[in-house]
Amino acid sequence: MKKVYYYALQPSDTTSAYRIHGVLPYIQHPDFLLIDISHYQHFTSDSMKGCDILIFQRPFTKQHADLILLCKSMGIKVILDYDDLLTAVDMYNPTYHLYQAHQETLLECIKMADELWVSTETIKAEYRHFNTYIVPNAHNDYIHKVEDKLPFTANKKVIYRGGASHKADVYEKGELLVETINGNTGWTFTFMGDRYEWLEQRTGDNHHIVGGMSIPSYFSFIYRENPSIFIFPLCTTLFNRAKSNISWLEASYVGSVFFGNTDLPEFNPERVLPIDELNGWIKEGDPDVMDFYNRVSWMYICDILLLSKVNEIRKERILANL
């Protein structure tokens, strides 16, 4: 049996949940065995012996390039997985200087790879000169069963979730958010993850703050809340144009209508409402229309973006490289 090793830099983070540790363990095939090596501290020809393919998430440093070079010297196929366009990280992003300092080795890693897996069409277009395949992020229907999807409920709850990298995205819509929160005191607005002090200073008791939590706890929380609305503002930049839509996936499953930047290709206006219209929809929006947007989103996910279906793409690409 062939052996496929996989390596994630941060196994417990969200990108790994959607790209590596939360997806690859569900793939089984009689011709190959998937083996997690994310815990390895050092890589040598002995530690990589017996490997036929390495799936490596988000490599960009010299150490990462050295591992890829080692694999190539041993005849091991290398598949690199990128969920973000690391060649276009916005300067306001906390990781900007990190990735800027490693642009040369990032490109070196990409050039050495036998194949790239990326999450969006925009990333594929930017990496069009390489052997690139789209493997979209998907709803994990192995854990979160299709039949357990929640219906839309007009319960006047709004949730946002995001980390430190999204401060500029949130603050670009800061005035809108302050006006919306303060103008709709019968609604609760929960911000999960990073703190947005500028908003906190300007809003009242209906602005709730929830700190970071594990991924299973997060899913339990949003499922229990079943919020009417999910929001996810993003600036219109190349980096964000390449972003995938995992917050929309999560929102759709827990019965929420999603408000985002519909100018970005992954936030299709047929399934996403414009973030600039948030206040108007809260004040005057028809719950039946909001329910329709949620149901259309979920139908699209069930047709195309269930992990059980997307993993077939991964399986096909692994077999093609054996």
Image (cartoon, rainbow, N blue to C red):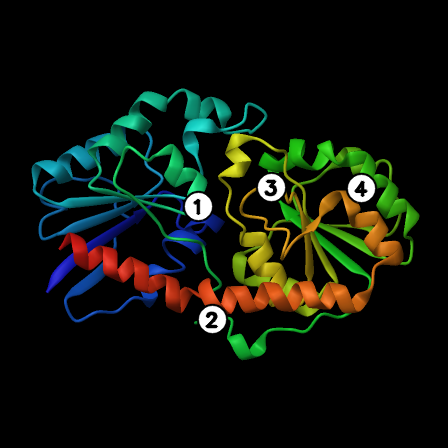
The reply to whether residue 155 is in sight is: no
The residue positioned 30% from the left and 58% from the top of the image is: 314
Per the model, the C-alpha gap separating discs 4 and 2 is 33 Å
The reply to whether discs 1 and 2 touch (Cβ–Cβ < 8 Å) is no
Per the model, the C-alpha gap separating discs 4 and 1 is 28 Å
Q: Which residue is mark 2?
A: 143
The residue positioned 54% from the left and 47% from the top of the image is: 266
Instruction: Indicate left or right for 171 with 87 as reference.
Output: right
Pick the residue in front: 8 or 46: 8
Q: Residue 206: percent from the left, percent from the top?
A: 86, 52
Viewer-side label of 3, 1? 1
Task: Say which element carries label 1.
Answer: loop
Pick the residue in front: 268 or 170: 268
Task: Say which element carries label 4.
Answer: helix
Q: Which residue is mark 3?
A: 163
* Label whose residue precedes the other's in the sequence (4 or 2): 2
* Label whose residue precedes the other's in the sequence (1 or 2): 1
Three-letter amino acid code at disc 4? Leu
